[in-house]
Amino acid sequence: DQQVKQNSPSLSVQEGRISILNCDYTNSMFDYFLWYKKYPAEGPTFLISISSIKDKNEDGRFTVFLNKSAKHLSLHIVPSQPGDSAVYFCAAKGSGGSNYKLTFGKGTLLTVNP
Amino acid sequence: NAGVMQNPRHLVRRRGQEARLRCSPMKGHSHVYWYRQLPEEGLKFMVYLQKENIIDESGMPKERFSAEFPKEGPSILRIQQVVRGDSAAYFCASSPLGTDGELFFGEGSRLTVL
């Protein structure tokens, strides 16, 4: 029972273009969403987050959009750079007693070609 | 300002042996989380600990797995009588607050069971 789904296992884009990574969730109790970036043989690194009270959060080249009614979020990277090539994990957590627990998607491997 | 330190980075065990994975949280962090990543999967929550307390072990298999975070020293994830299905990357994360904020992950310990 996957509560956080990243349906694209991989994505390839040209340097300088926009990368759009998508994430869907099923648990309506989730109210905080995060994106993590992971290089091979390293741990995940926090990238950007968004609370359910917002529909957009921007940090430099990275913007996360949240559509609560569709239970969908997306990460936009523009312009994409070769150093952005990594696996991107979408994660979510809810309020209440277990609000420390992150639920992760399976990840999307982004390849940015020079 | 060291990050989350995990060791060993790689561990090979034969079926039936014991595996011990260690995690030292970031300085100032008193909350530790263990996540497991099976091949082709996202990270899955295992256990949440504070010093000398297990707060939530709902993600940990009931048998053979145990975790501790003693008053002094690192957190330890212990797997007894390992089986091939235990082969995975085990990530430790820490946070300064138990219920908010991003998690800071270590580089992971990769367990291979022969």
Image (cartoon, coloured by chain):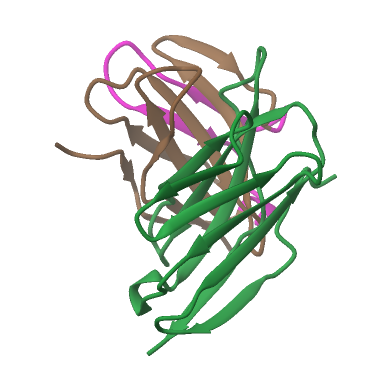
Residue at the farthest left position: B1
Q: Is residue B67 shown above or below A67?
A: above
Q: Is residue A43 visible?
A: yes
* Of residues B61 and A76, the one drawn nearer to the viewer in this rendering: A76
Q: Which chain is brown?
A: B
Q: Is residue A91 shown above or below A17?
A: above
Q: Is residue A103 left or right of residue B89?
A: right
Q: Residue at x 60, y 77 (%)?
A: A11
Count of labels shown?
Answer: 0
Q: Is residue A10 shown above or below A77?
A: below
Residue bounds of the magenta highlight: B61-86
Q: Residue at x 54, y 50 (%)?
A: A64
Q: Position of residue B39 (x, y in %)?
A: 63, 62
The tint chain A carries is: green
Identify the image quadrant of the C terminus of chain B.
Answer: bottom right
Q: Residue at x 56, y 13 (%)?
A: B55
Q: Which image quadrant is residue B38 in?
A: bottom right
Q: Position of residue A50 (x, y in %)?
A: 54, 38
Q: Position of residue A101 (x, y in %)?
A: 60, 28
Residue A101, magenta (yes or no): no
* Of residues A39 and B74, the one drawn nearer to the viewer in this rendering: A39
Q: Is residue B42 left or right of residue B103?
A: right
Q: Is residue B16 visible?
A: no
* Of residues A53 and B29, the one drawn nearer to the viewer in this rendering: A53
Q: Position of residue A102 (x, y in %)?
A: 60, 35
